[in-house]
Amino acid sequence: MHLYEAWRRNLEDLVIQRGGVVLLHASLFVIGLLFGALALRSLDADTRLELTRQLADSVRVLGQAPAPETGPLVRDALLRQARQVSLMWVLSISLVGAVAVMALPLLRGFISGFAVAYLTAEFGTRGVLLAAAGHLPQTVLEVPGLILAASASVGFALEVATSWRVRRRLSGYYGALAAYSNTLLSAAALLVAAALVEGFISPHLIRLVAGARM
């Protein structure tokens, strides 16, 4: 209970203190969604046909194959999220690299927008169900975690840069770094939960949709 209260307080403080930065990253994610959906129109007919064929084959195999082993799926998802969090931490403490952190929500939105738009356009109702089964469950947790982690990273870089510009010294740097690292870990808890959902739940939901006759 104490850990949960500390976790919640960390994220609440981030939203209150860095509300503008959080809103900026949420807006970047939405912009990425729109660009991802629009990017579908840039694909030529041959590319779309090949993608559709490969995806249809994959869906058919998933519907007929036995349940996948969750261990490797969970491990890969956790490693991907760990790399993402580590990248944000390294970029933020470099200060200049914090600008690149802002591209992560944009990229995540682009991927989500393209995937959902493609599945819906090519497979209709079944595509919507596939997107809901294979993409939505972990995204509900991953996107807030990513936005909060990116906001904490950029907020830390802004705090350190402001301190240097005003005082010409990095006053309280290590204290700010410790507080930022703590907040980043709190946001990373959402990413870990998303990885667990992606490995344990989403594959079974996809199999249900893939095996259904529509």
Image (spheres, rainbow, N blue to C red):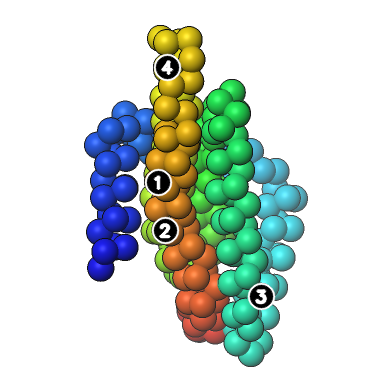
Identify the mark nearer the N-term, 3 or 2: 3
Disc sitting over residue 190 in the figure: 2
Identify the mark nearer the N-term, 4 or 2: 4
Q: Residues within 10 Å of mark 1 (few under 14, many from 20)?
A: many
Disc sitting over residue 72 in the figure: 3
Does residue 204 appear to the left or right of 61 in the view shown? left
Q: Residues within 10 Å of mark 2 (few under 14, many from 20)?
A: many
Identify the mark nearer the N-term, 3 or 4: 3
Between 38 and 67, which is closer to the camera in this rendering? 67
Where 3 falls versus 205 (above or below)?
above
Residue type (three-letter) at the residue carrying disc 2: Leu
Disc sitting over residue 183 in the figure: 1
Residue type (three-letter) at the residue carrying disc 3: Pro
Residue type (three-letter) at the residue carrying disc 4: Thr
Q: Residues within 10 Å of mark 3 (few under 14, many from 20)?
A: few
Disc sitting over residue 162 in the figure: 4
Q: Secondary structure at mark 4?
A: helix
Q: Secondary structure at mark 2?
A: helix
Residue type (three-letter) at the residue carrying disc 1: Thr
Q: Secondary structure at mark 3?
A: helix
Instruction: Classify residue 8 by image quadrant.
Output: bottom left
Q: Is residue 96 visible?
A: yes
Q: Residue at x 31, y 47 (%)?
A: 11
Provide residue 91's location: percent of width, then percent of height: 59, 34
Provide residue 67's location: percent of width, then percent of height: 60, 87
User: Label 3, label 4: how many angstroms apart (C-alpha)?
Assistant: 44 Å
Q: Pointer 3 and pointer 2: residues touching (CB < 8 Å)?
A: no
User: Label 2, label 1: how many angstroms apart (C-alpha)?
Assistant: 12 Å
Specify the quadrant that holds the N terminus.
bottom left
User: Label 1, label 3: how many angstroms apart (C-alpha)?
Assistant: 28 Å
Q: Is residue 209 visible?
A: no
